[in-house]
Amino acid sequence: MKSHTEYLTFNLPARMAFENITPRVEAILAKSGIVEGLLLCNAMHITASVFINDDEPGLHEDYKKWLEGLAPFDASTRYQHNRTGEDNADAHLKRQVMGREVVLAITKGKLDFGPWEQIFYGEFDGRRPKRVLVKIIGE
């Protein structure tokens, strides 16, 4: 069994944003030479996410509105976490909802997606560098 590991770095200018990372992940898969196996892609920061869904701008705006309704940004002491000197409690909660990682099957050297599926990086406390791990195992 072979393995291949790479890291992607993001520094999105907005506090909350989504970026389609599918082409970058596919390039890493091609470089790995693995044709049958599994690919793990996970955000390595507690205020960011990796998830799979449709690349449709309206859906992404709906996500932002929905997430802001669930956990609105509020730098005050509304959240216990912010009483520690932080101002990003909402970002931790948004990440929990959107998830940390995705695992994808690799079949015949390609990501085995369903219709319309794409991989996204979700940022909930932007304006600083964060990493995403891409780990591939297989033959």
Image (spheres, rainbow, N blue to C red):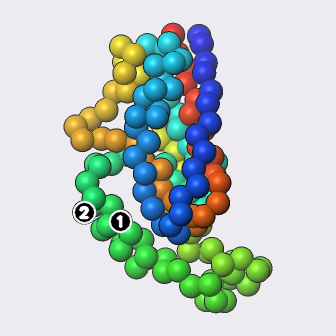
Q: Nearer the viewer, residue 10 or 99?
A: 10
Residue 77 position (above or below residue 6): below
Would residue 77 be seen by someone viewing this image from the given angle? yes
Mark 1 vs 2: CB contact within 8 A: no
Would residue 96 be seen by someone viewing this image from the given angle? no
| Image point (40%, 79%), residue name | 69
Report helix, strand or loop for mark 1: helix
| Image point (52%, 54%), residue name | 49
Q: CA distance from mark 1 to mark 2?
A: 9 Å
Tell me the quarter of the picture where residue 23 sits. top left
Task: Residue under label 1, please give it.
Answer: 63
| Image point (43%, 76%), residue name | 68
**Residue 58: mark:** 2
Tell me the quarter of the picture where residue 6 sits. top right
Could you say where residue 54 lies in the image, as x and y percent from the top left?
28, 49
Mark 2 surroundings within 10 Å by alpha-carbon count, few (fewer than 14), some (14 through 19), many (20 or more): few
Report helix, strand or loop for mark 2: helix
**Residue 47: mark:** none
The amino acid type of the residue labelled 1 equals Tyr
The amino acid type of the residue labelled 2 equals Gly
Mark 1 surroundings within 10 Å by alpha-carbon count, few (fewer than 14), some (14 through 19), many (20 or more): some
**Label total for image:** 2
Residue 6 position (above or below residue 84): above
Could you say where residue 21 lies in the image, as x and y percent from the top left?
44, 42
| Image quarter in which the N terminus is found | top right
Q: Nearer the viewer, residue 31 or 114?
A: 31
Could you say where residue 4 lies in the image, as x and y percent from the top left?
60, 21
